[in-house]
């Protein structure tokens, strides 16, 4: 059974990520770990015994708060709670703690809400951006305005380099959900139609029958993110998937590549990011 680490800071915005996590688990029998990091400020004048007792009491209060918060999320969704646990960790460095816990506990996916960061320069400095750029565990970034819905179709946006290995991971994610997969490639003027036809024929031979191949010419007047947003609005996927080369600053390269520095994805689409092998 796979495990999903769903993060929350108890805010209303963070509930979108929890809603998506619960939806995903309901379709795929995931275990969910609801995860919260906290930091307790301790007066420097206190002795060790007092500090230890205070930290213990605060941890108990926060643990109970998380359990009640998650219970209310399930209640609001009118869903009977299933396989989940609530975990809290004390830390100043939120994204590092999330990443280390996920890796140490063999978590399959990390789910975090984008909280409407908006401008990509701001997003890159957030926990979401840091996780996408650094986590060995795939990250699902859920827009703060996401509304829970059955996951039915996956949009995999690909540069077609190493797509054979990447599509296998996409199908592994999509198949238990019984979701269709659309591989989208944004073409440039330099690409050869014959090469794309070869790839399309190869994709047609994939065992998983719900895979389609779609190409859209790049608009030279738009940034890449703008072209992707147009495709997202047209296709209306339940989830979008991309692969990133973390050591090359892919996230910034893609989304700050031209005129647009806005991360909107107004179609309210969660983004699952794998790192390239």
Image: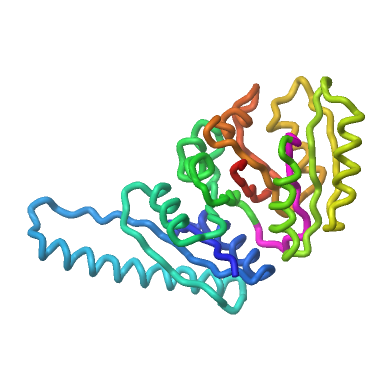
- Taking depth in this image into account, of 145 and 248 the one nearest to the observer is 248
Q: In screen coordinates, is 10 left or right of 227? A: left
Chosen colour scheme: rainbow
Q: Name the main secondary structure of what is drawn in magenta.
A: loop
Task: Identify the residue at horizontal 75%, vertical 62% (top origin).
Answer: 175
- Taking depth in this image into account, of 3 and 216 the one nearest to the observer is 3
Task: Identify the residue at horizontal 64%, vertical 42% (top origin).
Answer: 243
The image shows residue 200 at horizontal and vertical percentages of: 88, 41
Against 101, residue 199 (above or below) is above
The image shows residue 191 at horizontal and vertical percentages of: 83, 24
Task: Identify the residue at horizontal 74%, vertical 48% (top origin).
Answer: 167
Task: Identify the residue at horizontal 77%, vertical 37% (top origin).
Answer: 230
Q: Is residue 159 magenta?
A: yes
Specify start and end residues of the magenta stretch as a single range: 147-160
**Image quarter hosting the N terminus:** bottom right
The image shows residue 104 at horizontal and vertical percentages of: 43, 58
Q: In screen coordinates, is 152 left or right of 258? A: right
Q: Is residue 142 magenta?
A: no
Q: Quadrant of residue 183?
A: top right
The image shows residue 5 at horizontal and vertical percentages of: 51, 60
Count of numbered tags: 0
């Amino acid at each position: 059974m796979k495990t999903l680490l769903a993060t929350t800071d108890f805010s209303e915005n963070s509930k979108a990520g929890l809603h998506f996590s619960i939806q995903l688990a309901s379709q795929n029998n995931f275990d969910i770990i609801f995860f919260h990091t906290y930091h307790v400020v301790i007066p420097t004048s206190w002795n060790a015994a007092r500090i230890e007792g205070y930290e213990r009491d605060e941890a108990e209060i926060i643990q109970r708060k998380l359990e009640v918060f998650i219970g209310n999320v399930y209640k609001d969704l009118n869903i009977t709670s299933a396989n989940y646990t609530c975990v809290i960790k004390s830390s100043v460095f939120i994204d590092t703690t999330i990443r280390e816990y996920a890796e140490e506990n063999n978590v399959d996916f990390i789910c975090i809400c984008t909280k409407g960061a908006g401008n990509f320069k701001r997003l890159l400095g957030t926990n979401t951006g840091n996780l996408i750029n650094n986590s060995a565990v795939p990250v699902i970034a859920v827009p703060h305005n996401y509304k829970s819905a059955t996951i039915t179709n996956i949009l995999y946006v690909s540069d077609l380099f190493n797509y054979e290995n990447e599509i296998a991971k996409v199908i592994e994610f999509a198949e238990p959900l019984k979701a269709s997969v659309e591989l989208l490639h944004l073409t440039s003027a330099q690409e050869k139609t014959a090469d794309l036809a070869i790839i399309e024929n190869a994709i047609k031979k994939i065992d998983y029958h719900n895979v389609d191949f779609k190409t859209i010419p790049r608009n030279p007047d738009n940034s890449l993110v703008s072209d992707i947003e147009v495709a997202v609005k047209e296709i209306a996927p339940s989830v979008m998937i991309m692969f990133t080369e973390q050591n090359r600053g892919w996230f910034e390269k893609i989304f700050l590549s031209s005129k647009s520095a806005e991360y909107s994805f107004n179609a309210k689409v969660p983004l699952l990011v794998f790192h390239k092998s």
